[in-house]
Each structure stands twice: as structure tokens, then as C-alpha cells.
Image (cartoon, rainbow, N blue to C red):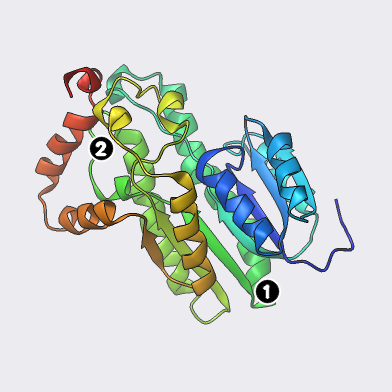
Amino acid sequence: MTTDSTRPLAVVTGASSGIGRELALLCAQNHHDLVIAADEGPLEEVARELRTVGAQVDVVKADLATLAGVDQLTATIGGRPVAALLANAGHGLGHAFLDQDFSAARHVIDTNITGTLDLLHRVGRDMRRRNAGRILVTGSIAGLMPGAFQAVYNGTKAFIDSFCYALRNELKDSGVTVTCLMPGPTDTHFFERADLTDTKVAVDKKADPADVARAGFEAMMDGDSDVVAGWKNKLQAILANVTPAEMLAQQHRKIAEPGSGRRA
């Protein structure tokens, strides 16, 4: 839907809850109109909240793992210049890889990688043409370690973390910035959707999504390359760079193996 608003437009995916909802609220509070998208959750409720802050809001309920979903989102943007793209949509998946339904694993890959890159390609080209725009992509510190019993998810985040640095370099002289938000475990619906509720990582204390979103939003507005939210996660990220991969995989097994939450 095209409007006459002079406020800059922000597009936030995965906006129905958690980090994405908080990112959308920060955009509205910082005088952006919004297009918000998610495949499930109370998007209309989120939109009402954003409108109370003064934002004009379009809602897109679509599966961004699919071409049709990304088409629907870009059609709603409708050629309007996007000042900020906050690509936060993502799914997890617990259990051993060979025990997973591969269609579920494929959906994680298509959501976290394929759909995200499709959207970045479409919106990013227009930003580059205009020599202006900010991109925030939600990666994860999970991308820094082999994720035993969460192998597909961690693998997708390793891809996204790496991709963000590469895209940022390609756009360094364009006026478009790329920032990678790298949270650790955060208090969202992620663990229920990923079937991880009986794991140690699910029962341990987690970060507040509002704090994580603020760290990401501020880094995006400052044009930073990345931000690891939380001092414990910063320490973990540093240690991941000097710890052998086999050891990291074993450490991850202890927190993500089914039943590990009952042994905690």
C-alpha cells in the first residue's frame, strides 16, 4: 500500500514476537513507517501497537521460506524506497540430524538462508541504486560453533554470519550499510518452535529480546559491521575463535541434546 507519509520506511521480518517485534517497535519509536511480516503470530496486534506510536503499518502474513512469500512481501513494499531492512525471520530445529524430518530441515534452510537472501537481493539492489539504506540481519553466535543436535540451524547461521561480512564489503562504497546482529539464547518462542524445550539451553537463563533488539538497532543506526548482544555471549564468541571445533561440538551437545534440560 503506497502512502503519502514522508517518514522513512522500515521492513521487519519475523516481527510477530521476540526480537523482531522489539525491532519493529524501535523503528516506530524512531519515526519510521513499517511493513512487518511473519508466517504466524499476532501480527495485527503488533501493528496496532506500532500505530499508537504514530507509524503507518502494512502487515504481511507469509512464509518467507517460499518464493510466493517473498513476492507477497515485495509487492506490499510496492516500489517504495526502503530506508531500513531488518531481516530477522528465522527458524530453529532440534534433535539429531538423521532423526529429523528432512522437509523440516529444508524449511529451516529455506527460511534462514534462501528466503533471507532473496529479500536482501531485491531490496538491496534498490538501496544500492539510491546509494542509501541500512540492512540488519539477525545471525547468531550459534554460527560460530558446530551445533551438535542443532546442526542445520547452526549451519545456516554460520552461512548468514559469513554472508553479512561479505555483502558489507561489497557495498562499502555504496552508501548502504550491512550489520549482523549475533544474539545468544534469547527468551522467545524459538525453543518451542524448534522442539528444544527439554534441553539445557532452553531451561537456562536467556536474554531479554528487548535488550537484544536495542543492541542490534543501535548498531545498525551507527553503521557497525556486527554486534554480539550480551557480555556472556561476547566472551563465548571470543572463546569460539580459539577452541577446536571438535570441542565446541561436544560443548554444544551438552546443552542441546534432547533430555539435557532434565539433567541440568
Q: Residue 136 location in percent, x, y?
A: 52, 59
The residue at the point 71 percent across, 48 percent down is 50
Marks 2/1: CA–CA distance:
38 Å
Residue 129's disc is: 1
Q: Is residue 55 left or right of residue 94?
A: right
Relative to 145, say whether 121 is above or below: below
The residue at the point 20 percent across, 36 percent down is 252
Q: Is residue 202 left or right of residue 63?
A: left
- Name the residue tied to disc 2: 147
Q: Amino acid at mark 2?
A: Gly
Q: Amino acid at mark 1?
A: Arg
Instruction: Please rate how many residues cluster around mark 1, counting C-alpha atoms within 10 Å: few if below 14, some from 14 to 19, many from 20.
Output: few
Instruction: Please rate how many residues cluster around mark 2, counting C-alpha atoms within 10 Å: few if below 14, some from 14 to 19, many from 20.
Output: many
| Pointer 2 with pointer 1, Cβ within 8 A | no
Residue 72 shows up from this direction: no
Disc 2, SS: loop
Q: Residue 80 location in percent, x, y?
A: 78, 62
Q: Earlier in the sequence, mark 2 or mark 1?
A: 1
Disc 1, SS: helix
Q: 179 or 29, which is in the foreground? A: 29
